Image: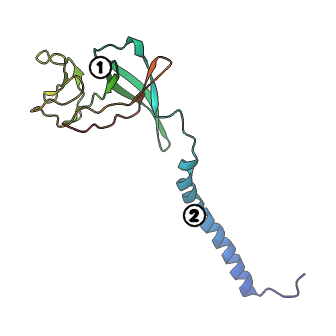
Amino acid sequence: MSKQRVTRRQFLTYTLMGVGGFMAAGTVMPMLRFAVDPVLEAKKGGDFIATNVKVDELTSEPVRVDFKYKQVDGWYESEVTQTAWVYKDEKGDIVALSPVCKHLGCTVNWNGSPKHPNMFFCPCHNGLYEKDGKNVPNTPPTKPLDIFDYQVKDGYLYLSMRAKERGGA
């Protein structure tokens, strides 16, 4: 045993510092975990979602493709359904367009208007898009339709979870 005695004041100081340290650790650790946890989380399957469309069956006529994926917001997990208009262009490349109108977010349809055949039509405000998704001048949309990235695996089409914006009018 030590010959040096601990005074009451030293005992209280050590005790308060120990309790304060535990309280500080209890406060800081959740914040530290919140900051570091997303970095350490393993990524699941990438950003491409499988569709039930065989690439060989795609033609020059746009078809509506629905695909689903699970989305986690905090503790809430939901199933999100996305839609794309998919076709092959003159070169044989796959084109996957978002159906969301760039004017006010309505849903565009292929051949949706008898007056405008072979075009994407937005029924909300008579918006028109060419087959390649470019907006028709002097109609409400100010930008072309967004486009999905795609991959082909085992003959099936995989689409990105989110469409990306294209430039130009």
For the point 65% across and 70% down, the residue is 21
For the point 41% across and 24% down, the residue is 67
For the point 54% across and 39% down, the residue is 43
Kindly state the secondary structure of the residue where label 1 is placed. Answer: loop
* In this rendering, the label closer to the viewer, 1 or 2: 1
Image height check: is 118 above or below 150?
A: above
Q: Quadrant of the N terminus?
A: bottom right
Location of residue 89 in the rendering, given as x and y in whole percent from the top left corner: 29, 19
Location of residue 59 in the rendering, given as x and y in whole percent from the top left corner: 32, 13
Mark 1 vs 2: CB contact within 8 A: no
Q: How many marks?
A: 2
Q: Could you tell me the amino acid type at mark 2?
A: Thr
Check the image and name the residue furthest to the top.
57
In the picture of the structure, the residue carrying the numbered disc 1 is 89
Q: Could you tell me the amino acid type at mark 1?
A: Asp
Image height check: is 51 above or below 25?
A: above
Kindly state the secondary structure of the residue where label 2 is placed. Answer: helix
Q: Quadrant of the C terminus?
A: top left
Q: Report whether 161 appears left or right of 133.
A: right
Question: Relative to the observer, which residue lies in front, 15 or 114?
Answer: 114
Q: Report whether 54 appears left or right of 143.
A: right
**Label placed on residue 27:** 2
Disc with the residue nearer the chain's start (1 vs 2): 2
Check the image and name the residue furthest to the left.
138
- Could you classify mark 2 by the number of other residues whose Cα lies within 10 Å: few (under 14), some (14-19), or many (20 or more)? few
Q: Report whether 36 appears left or right of 86.
A: right
Q: How is the image coloured?
A: rainbow
